[in-house]
Amino acid sequence: MKFKDIVFPDVKKVAVSLSGGLDSTTLVCMLTKHYGAENVFAISYYYKQKQSIELELAKATCLKLGINHSVHDISFLGDIAGKVSANIQGSEIAMPTIQDILGVPQPVTYVPFRNLIFSSILLGFAEANDCGAVALGIQSQDLYSYWDCSQAFTALLQDICNQNRLHQIQIFTPFVSLGKSDEIAIGTEIGVDYALTLTCYNPDDNGVSDGTCPSCAERIMAFAENKIVDPIKYSIDIDWFTAFSKAE
C-alpha cells in the first residue's frame, strides 16, 4: 500500500482524532499532505490515561504540521473506567503482556466505549466547524482485537451520521483493514516523524515506553517488519537484528 493508493473523502475540511500514538499521527500527517494544513482540525482527549504524556507529542506534531489542534478534558471517562481498565491512572489492574491477552475477547486494556465517546465528540466538532469528514486511526488488525476498532463499528457510525438531515459527514478509517506494518510503510513514505509518537500503555514518568505491554509488542513487530529501527526509547534493550530476522 502506497500513499497514492489511499482514497480520501471528496471534502474540503476534515476533523481528526489525534492521540499522539502511531496510528493517529500517521493519519494526521496523511490528511495534512492531502488537504493542506489549513483544512485539517485535530482533537485530542485527556481521560486520565496512563500514557497522557502522548498529548504533548500530539501538540508537537500539530505545531510542526501547522494545523489547528485542541485538547479536551474528559476525565469523567477515567473515573468511570478506572475499576475495569488497566489503561487508567491509579488502576489496580496489572498491565498485561501481549502473551497474556492473545485470544481474549475483551482485554483489560480496553476502555469501555472509548471510541464511541471520542467519535461522538469529534462528530459534534466536525458539524460545528463545517467539516465534511471525520478521520479515525482505528485499526482492526491488532493481534488482540477491540470491538470498537472493527469495520462493523465504523459502518454503524456512518449509519448514525446518515441520519443527520442537514449536515452529511463521512467516516474515514483508512487503516481499519490494514496492519501497523502497512501504516509505518505509508508514514515513512511521506516523512512521518515517529520520534514524536507514543504507543506504550504504561510509559514511565519521562515518557519512555516499557517495551513489554501489548501496544509496544505490536509496534516493535511492525517496525521490524519494515526493517526500520524504531526512533523512540524503550526501558528494555530491543535486539533489532533478531527482530528483523524473525519478521522475515
Image (cartoon, rainbow, N blue to C red):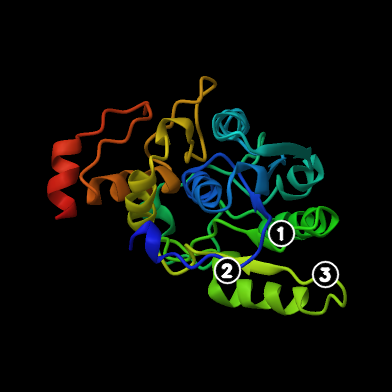
Amino acid carrying mark 1 in the image: Ser
In this rendering, position of residue 175 left or right of residue 9? left
Amino acid carrying mark 3 in the image: His
In this rendering, position of residue 87 left or right of residue 76? left
**How many other residues sit within 10 Å of disc 3, few (<14), some (14-19) or many (≥20)?**
some
**Residue at image location 81% in from the left, 44% down from the top:** 76
**How many other residues sit within 10 Å of disc 1, few (<14), some (14-19) or many (≥20)?**
many
Which residue position holds label 2?
147
Disc 1/disc 2 C-alpha distance (Å): 14 Å
Q: Position of residue 142 (x, y in %)?
A: 42, 61
Query: Nearer the N terminus, badge 3 or badge 2?
Result: 2
Taking depth in this image into account, of 76 and 196 the one nearest to the observer is: 196
**Rendered-image quadrant of the C terminus:** bottom left
Q: Position of residue 227 (x, y in %)?
A: 20, 45
Disc 1/disc 3 C-alpha distance (Å): 16 Å
Give the mark toward the camera: 1 or 2.
Answer: 1
Q: Residue 28, relative to residue 55: is it above or below?
A: below
